[in-house]
Amino acid sequence: MREVVQYPLLEIAVPYQYRVREDPVGGVKRRRRESAQPDDECKRVKVSTPEARADESRLEVSSPSSLPVAATGAPAVAEVEEVLPLSPLASPGPRDDQTGEDDALCASQLYTNELYSMVKRELPPTCYKNLLFQLVSNMDRKELSDLGTLITDNLKRDFLSSLPFEIALKVLTNLSFADIAQCLQTCKSWNSLINSTPHLWRQMLLTESFVSKENFAKYSSKLKAKYPQIKNEEDGYQLDFLENCRVLQNWFNPKFTPQRTTLRGHMTSVVTCLQFEDNYVITGADDKVIRVYDSEKKQFLMELTGHDGGVWALKYDEDGILVSGSTDRSVRVWDIKRGCCTHVFKGHASTVRCLDIVEYKKVKYIVTGSRDNTLHVWKLPLEPVAEGQEWPVVYNTPEENPYFVGVLRGHMASVRTVSGHGNIVISGSYDNNLMVWDIAQMKCLYILTGHTDRIYSTIYDHKRFRCISASMDTTIRVWDLQNIWNNGTCTVVTTSQAPCTKISGSMSTLQGHTQLVGLLRLSDRFLVSAAADGSLRGWDSNDYSRKFAYHHNNLSAITTFYMSDNLLVSGSEGQFNVYNLRSGKLIHSNILRDADQIWSVNFKGGILVAAVEKDGQSYVELLDFSNAGTARNIPIQGHV
């Protein structure tokens, strides 16, 4: 059966913009050549035909005003009549077939080009558009398909490459990594632009929360050591970003089993404090010992001994410098690289329960809080080692200690928590109050009241100038330190040292827990609290709206947790959970199923560290999410 040719556009009316419209006088608007006379009604143009290029022929083009009207109501375009040559060309011989075909094709192309130029030149714009529309309307489906492909290909435009580099970079930095991955596969020019722009990869490291802005300089300085093949630090941004993405996907994969290394811990089962910085995992316990492990080699390094009581506070600075506080009432400074204690500071009258290190005007200070109700401030010793110096240097009293700055008094009960940045330090006490100190002037600025029970944790949010505290009264309170009038009533009171402002009431009170809230952590996106009721609650770090709540199955008290913008890891008696904060889902809950108690956790990159208790013994678990593998058990090391 013979196929019927279809012309799908034949019955479509001519669009308004393609119609030939008459001017107000009654004539058709058209463009005239400069050489034409005003009253000319038609023109004749000489063109060459494919058959006889030397012979003359004429195409008669009717005046637009005399064009016949089509069935659609629009004027039809004037027909172009070709005058045949007077004598035909001779037929080519057998040897001239190919040459004749080439000549015919060339002549046809020339004729087509001249015809197009003439029509484009002679017809007014409206008539020209009308002609194009009618040509398209009379095409069959195959011709329309070919034309559509041609139009689509020619309408494609690489807008990104046509933009100035700064604007193109601005567009790319506002895309997620999923969108960037699609852009890399779009075309070679986009791929080259993205791969050759370190600033873009730097921005993605920040937006994906792999690195924080305040730690970026320190992070960047370590890239050359991590990737020896790179020449500049910037060359490592893309490599490290892709590596972080790979590791994060392992974290997010519930079927992924990390490589597990188990190391023996302290002689006592309870680990009181843990630090994970650089490649050092450092733990303290009531056995008076500080143990140091290498997270990269996954092995025990050394024991630091010297305290006469349990180690209850640790703070790592940098370059192997560590500060510890103990129940023996002393503060010790250690150099891990040399494996010894360098300084011993005495002055507290009871257990050193908490400590922090702050830096102000390029000087680092140790701030310690004690059960003697006071805070002590010391300069962190960073002088070069003198030849023949014997270690440690012991200062039995503050008066003889050149590093001693002063004592901050004001609390009426044990100082349980301390947090600071720059010259501002905040302390929380069992007297239910918080105090804001300026260590540059060694005076109290504010007394924050509002909690009705002991304070167990506090955070100084220096980016937003706020203080966040958690208490045994089951609440979390937020205080505005930039504009104190946003809180409660403000009154001036006199302490033992100088007058300061007492603020009664906080800017915001966060509720939801039903028992003691003992733990707080803050990231760029979230404020997370953990309580003895077995729950963790997440709040927006800016407006403190509720974001999530997780509950351990056994409802036992949360003893430890650690978090970033992407992950949250929590531990309690018999339970260890890993949550995906992007999706809000629980990912892993059976990695450390054999642990009886989780005392402390921390993670960095692909390494998760947990201090656990199993069968009454202390262990340190290293879980490597950058590698899948079997468990390794390392025998006890370091004990005498």
Image (cartoon, helix red, strand yellow):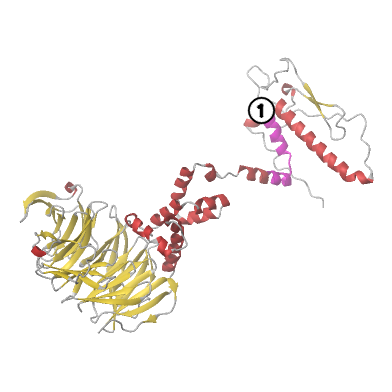
Three-letter residue code for mark 1:
Pro
Q: Residue at x 32, y 55 (%)?
A: 214
Q: Is residue 143 magenta?
A: yes
Nearer the observer, 500 or 95: 95
Q: Is residue 118 left or right of residue 585?
A: right
Residue 263 visible to the viewer: yes
Outermost residue to the front: 387
Q: Residues within 10 Å of mark 1 (few under 14, many from 20)?
A: some
Query: Is 435 left or right of 56, judged from the image as shown?
Result: left
* Image position of 403 with respect to 311: above or below: above
Q: Is residue 506 above or below residue 106?
A: below
Image quarter for residue 66? top right
Residue 201: image x %, image y %?
A: 44, 54
Range of the magenta residues? 127-147
Task: Please indicate, yes or no, whether residue 187 appears anywhere in the rendered image.
Answer: no
Residue 243 lies, in percent from the top left, at 45, 63
* Identity of the residue drawn at 41% across and 68% down: 251
Q: Residue tagged by mark 1?
A: 125
Residue 62: x percent and y percent? 77, 23
User: Which corner quadrant of the image does residue 267 belong to?
Assistant: bottom left
Badge 1 element: helix
